[in-house]
Amino acid sequence: MQREMESIEKTARWEIPYSHDIGETASRFFLELRDKARIMATKCPECRRVFLPPRSYCERCFISLEGHWVELNPEGTLEAFTIVTDDYSFSGMPKPPYVLCLVKLGHSSTCLPHFLLGVDLSDPRKAAQELKIGMPVRVVFKEHREARIDDFYVELVR
Amino acid sequence: MEQMPELIQMPGKWDLPWVYAAGEVGSRYIVELRDNARIVATKCPKCGRVLLPPRSFCERCFVSLKGHWVELEPKGTLEAFTIVTTVFPEQRPPPYIIGYFRIGGASTNIPHFLEGVDLSDIERAKSEIWVDMPVKVIFREQRVGSAADFYIVPLRD
């Protein structure tokens, strides 16, 4: 005699607080945001690639980029975006809808992830049609900065 | 003299709630602990290995073990152990003993705590437990459907 087997489910929760030493290169990046309101990247003297966020060595040439800092213009282009509409409770994220994006700032060779502001999200589908890769964006620094990635925000240039 | 750069430490936190489904075989294992106070395992019809906790297939033979249940005697041997004296987050306060146990002749070991050992003098306790030591499984009065529905103690004659 086979009876329907009860299905066992267990809920669990991983809560792991940690402290991350971000290192010299990343520290300088954040301190420049906080103290000088400017976006600093590192540039490889050999292949000329510009890394944002800055890296301490070039991944293609395997040479140290220590000391090879460049300042980037606080404007650039929208390279990719996602309009987030579902409330999946991603821990720490804002309430949808919001726009996540990748932007290429100044003469950076790489893209930086951030939120994209200045988008009318009252109709997310319509917004998705209107946003285009390559649209101009700009960086706006906040008055009060704390050496965090949100010391500035990125908005569409209209 | 060169100035030490200001180095930043960023706090982070992983906060991941999740639900684990034990599956058909895992559920039966848990339900048998809870409702019948017995330890059940699956046995491969091909190689004869007895897997505890039970698996739905044999990893060596790749045959299904569904339906191939065996009940195991609630005793066995201590295969490996650690006397834990350090505090780990979310774990019980030390000292305590974690071990791997071969229960009821299973081909595999299960991790569990070893209770019933006096740990007020750790050096003395070390001489009272050894690999291959006989142990027995004791089921709790109140069981909730968890690996903690039983506890393991040395089998003293």
Image (spheres, coloured by chain):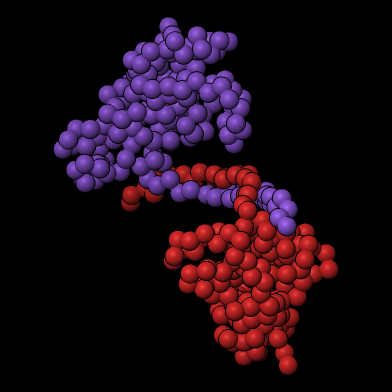
Chain colours: A purple, B red
Residue B55 % position (x, y):
56, 61
Residue A123 % position (x, y):
56, 10
Q: Residue furthest top?
A: A158
- Quadrant position of the C terminus of chain B in the picture: bottom right
Q: What residue appears at the point 64 percent right and 81 percent down from the top-left corner?
A: B76
Q: What residue appears at the point 64 percent right and 46 percent down from the top-left corner?
A: B19
Tally of marks: 0
Q: Is residue A101 left or right of residue A8?
A: left
Q: Residue furthest left?
A: A46
In this view, the residue in front, A32 or A8, is A8
Residue B92 % position (x, y):
69, 66
Q: Residue furthest front?
A: A1
Q: Is residue A119 left or right of residue B153?
A: left
Answer above or below: position of B52 versus B155: above
Quarter of the image holding residue A135? top left
Q: Residue furthest bottom?
A: B157
Residue A27 % position (x, y):
41, 41
**Res. A136 in view:** no
Quarter of the image holding residue A35? top left
Q: Is residue A58 left or right of residue A155?
A: left
**Res. A132 in view:** yes
